[in-house]
Amino acid sequence: MTMWHFISDHISEATGNVFVCQRRTAAHGGDTHECFVIRDDSRRFFVKVRKDDATRPLHCEMEGLQALESTDTVITPHVVCYGITEDKPDGFEYLVLNHIRFIDTPSDWHTMGAQLAKLHQVSQTQFGWSADNFIGASVQTNTWHSDWATFYAEYRIGSMLERLAMKGHKLTQADIFVTKVQQFLSSHHPAPSLVHGDLWSGNAGFCKKGPVLFDPAVYVGDRETDISMTRLFGGFGPSFYEGYNAVFPLDASYPTRENLYQLYHVLNHALLFTGAYLSQAKSAIMALEKQF
């Protein structure tokens, strides 16, 4: 049975309606998988496929999308089905999502901000996540923890610094810097919020029904981490922040933490792409050490 017959059968089982892939078109995707739009005469689906190995990034993406969807606050691609074939050497992991037709011109940033604020208001109990997942192509280290300062210092900044050091990039005295991060955040006690985790403009868009968020790296953290990410790579429209603050105003002290929360993503880019991102990470660490 070919891959597309296999996936078609699973779609048919999951939806209760027979689906046979008649056409498929390659679509823009990530570095770790291939993406396709598949269709029959009346329906279309968005499919991500990757060669099977020991990791399960598409499984993590599925869990993240389902967690966001369960809050009933933001539009995300709906998970149709997910699976793994264990056939060697041709096994593969796949994730099938409903197809969303995006609008080319960004529209209602205000609504996107308001919806994100509502997501962040959904009650959570602890910081972290039940298992490690992925931030881009990097493993995102997780555990459950009651203290935000300790979680962020150790499982976000500390984890990234350790991974960089293992690749030969020692950017600072990691133990000392992690302790400083923990001490700096120790007086900040945010409510646990489900966060998208990788919220830049490339992971957000608009369809006829409104704003859409996708490709998450979810965990329960400080809501400010999502906001800081939106400001790192070009930022969102000004009305996005107006919409957010109209529903769930940011604390006046948020700007003092923005650079620290952005550092996690800068370190991740340094880990993945090295080059100029290593220099940016070093500069960011030096600036934060002065702030501490």
Image (cartoon, grey):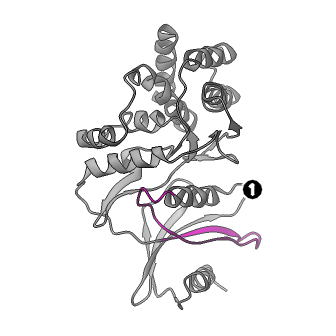
Q: Residue 209 placed where, x, y %? A: 31, 66
Image height check: is 86 above or below 277? below
Identify the residue at horizontal 51%, vertical 26% (top origin).
Answer: 278
Q: Which sits in the foreground, 178 or 285?
A: 178
Of residues 119 and 5, which is closer to you in this image? 119
Q: For the point 24% across and 42% down, which residue is it?
A: 239
Q: Is residue 167 visible?
A: no
Asked if one can make out residue 41 in the rendered structure from this viewpoint, the answer is yes
Q: Is residue 189 above or below residue 25?
A: above
Q: Is residue 195 above or below residue 82?
A: above
Count of number-bearing discs? 1
78 sits left or right of 53 in the view = left
Q: Secondary structure at mark 1?
A: loop
For the residue pair 93 and 263, the one nearer the viewer reads as: 263
Quadrant containing the N terminus in the rendered view: bottom right
The location of residue 89, given as percent across then percent down, is 75, 69
Residue 228 on image: x %, y %: 42, 33
The range drawn in magenta is 71-97
Taking 240 as reference, is 105 above or below it? Answer: below
**Residue found 40% across the figure and 21% down from its top:** 253
Residue that numbered label 1 is attached to: 54
Decide: few, some or many residues near mark 1? Use Cα within 10 Å; few <14, some 14-19, many ≥20.
few
How far across and down, in percent of the image, does residue 241 sit?
A: 30, 38
Indicate yes or no whether the magenta region holds residue 78. Answer: yes
What amino acid is found at the position of numbered circle 1 in the picture? Ala
